[in-house]
Image (tube, rainbow, N blue to C red):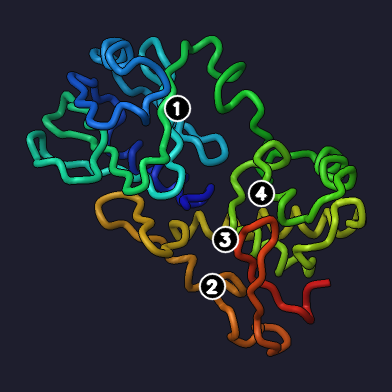
Amino acid sequence: MPELPEVETVRRTLERLILGKTIQDIEVIYPKIIQMDEHDFAKRLIGQTVHRIDRMGKHLIFHLDQDILIIHLRMEGRFFYHALGTRLTKHDHLCFHLSDGMQLTYHDVRKFGTMHLFDQEDYLKKGPLADLAKEPDDIEINEFKRSIQKRKTEIKAILLDQKVVSGLGNIYVDETLFRAGIHPTRLGIHITDLEVEKILDAAKAVLHKAIMLGGTTIRTFEAMDGVHGRFQNELMVHTKENKPCPICGTPIIKTKVKGRGTCVCPICQR
């Protein structure tokens, strides 16, 4: 699943390619991705120009003339940018025809991605961004402590909750907790103030490095046009089952926390 670094890489690529371009037509192949009537969606978007692309957590935010388009890539969503008229493939579900003679195609093997359209005035007040927490770089440490220490559930599950901290997914939570020395099954109410600070510092460091390297390429992630991330070369525990811990040499184990595959060093993480 594209997490914060992967979505940021997509955002930067899209910004370079489509800023200032006008949507001239839209082909909707799989309407369920659109969270409103598909005809109203197309009617509102046609004729609008892309002025800015932001990101909040794992959401892409397209600022247009009148509206805000919010896209969540979910498990395997991605974009391709080709010459207008390029033949669509099996898993292409929506195609924007742009004023530069190119087409931006949304491709999603599992069809889990979503697209929302809002007025500029209220896109932060309703829909997927309304309850979204701040990212590690923006969250205040005391707020973060309160969110974690009041909960009687596993710290990994807490960090995956986008209402607690946004942008972290399975890969980066595993890496964050390893760097902080915290076992993923520890309950939030048992995490000390110092440990919360370590978690936040580790999350920031992991995300900064991953963004710099273009994200993590595992399975099918590509930013666009074959752009792959390189952070997979920096992974310390995620996908490293039975391999030696880079710190103590103990084999990394893989378990499940709230149904999510979790890699952990049983010695370094307490």
Pick whichever of labels 3 and 2 is earlier in the sequence: 3
Label 2 – label 1 distance at C-alpha: 31 Å
Please give the residue where the numbered disc 1 appears in the rendered image. Answer: 70
Q: CA distance from mark 4 to mark 2?
A: 18 Å
Quadrant including the C terminus: bottom right
Residue found 92% across the figure and 57% down from its top:
190
Give the x, y percent position of residue 245: 66, 83
Q: Amino acid at mark 1?
A: Ile
Location of mark 3 (residue) = 171
- Give the residue at mark 2: 239
Q: Which residue is mark 4?
A: 160
Q: Is residue 139 above or below residue 220?
A: above
Q: Is residue 205 above or below residue 252?
A: above
Separation (CA) of disc 3 from disc 1: 23 Å
Q: Disc 4 marks which amino acid?
A: Leu
Rendered view: 249 above or below 161? below
Residue closer to the observer: 93 or 243: 93
- Secondary structure beneath dot 3 equals helix
Q: Quick check: 40 above or below 221? A: above
Badge 4 element: helix
Q: Position of residue 7 (x, y in %)?
A: 46, 45
The residue shown at (28%, 31%) is: 30
Choose the circle earlier in sequence order: 1 or 4: 1
